[in-house]
Image (spheres, rainbow, N blue to C red):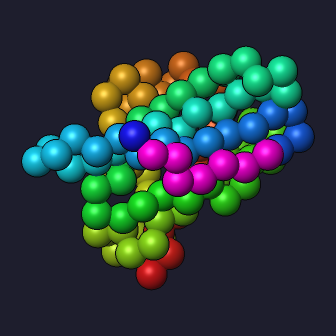
Amino acid sequence: MRRVGAINFEGGQAELIVVEQGAFGSYADLRIYNSEAEHIESIYIRAEDSMPTIDSIIGKDVYVSYRNFYSNDSILTYDRVMLGESLIDHDKLKFNYHFFNIK
C-alpha cells in the first residue's frame, strides 16, 4: 500500500491509498475523514492502468480525475470506475462522486 494523494477540505480530509495486487493489478482506496480525523467513508476505485487524483471536495461532492483512462468518455460513470461494494451500494454513499477522464 502506498499513499498517492491527500487533500484537505472544509470539514475534513481525504486520502488516496493504492493497493498493489500483483498479477491482479491495483486499486485505490479513497478514504474520507471528518475534521476530528474520524473515518467517514471509503470507496474502492480502479487504479491499474490510470492513476486517479482527488481534485477537490466541495460540500458533499468529491471530484476525481484520471489521465488517459482507457475510455474515450470525458465523464466516467460509476460502473467504469468503482469496484466491489462501492459500486453495488453506491446509492448508499454519504458523498457524491464525480469522475472525469482527462485526455
Which portion, as a residue range, is magenta? Answer: 2-8
Do we see residue 28 in this rendering? no
Identify the residue at horizontal 54%, vertical 19% (top origin): 92
Identify the residue at horizontal 31%, vertical 68% (top origin): 71
> Is the stretch drawn in magenta largely helix, strand or loop?
strand
Identify the residue at horizontal 53%, vertical 28% (top origin): 42
Spot the residue most to the bottom. 103
| Viewer-side residue, 88 vs 44 | 44
42 sits to left or right of 83: right
From the top left corner, tell me how far across and down residue 31 is, in percent. Answer: 58, 33
From the top left corner, tell me how far across and down residue 98 is, in percent. Answer: 58, 51
14 sits to left or right of 68: right
Do we see residue 26 in this rendering? yes
Task: Name the image quarter holding the C terminus.
Answer: bottom left
From the top left corner, tell me how far across and down residue 95 is, in percent. Answer: 66, 32
Give the quadrant of residue 61: top right
| Magenta span contains residue 99 | no
| Viewer-side residue, 54 vs 93 | 54
Give the total number of marks visible in the rendering. 0
Task: Name the image quarter holding the N terminus.
Answer: top left
Spot the residue most to the front. 2
Spot the residue most to the right. 10
| Viewer-side residue, 2 vs 51 | 2
From the top left corner, tell me how far across and down residue 27 is, in percent. Answer: 34, 44
Note whether 102 is above or below 31 in the view shown. Answer: below
Spot the residue most to the left. 23
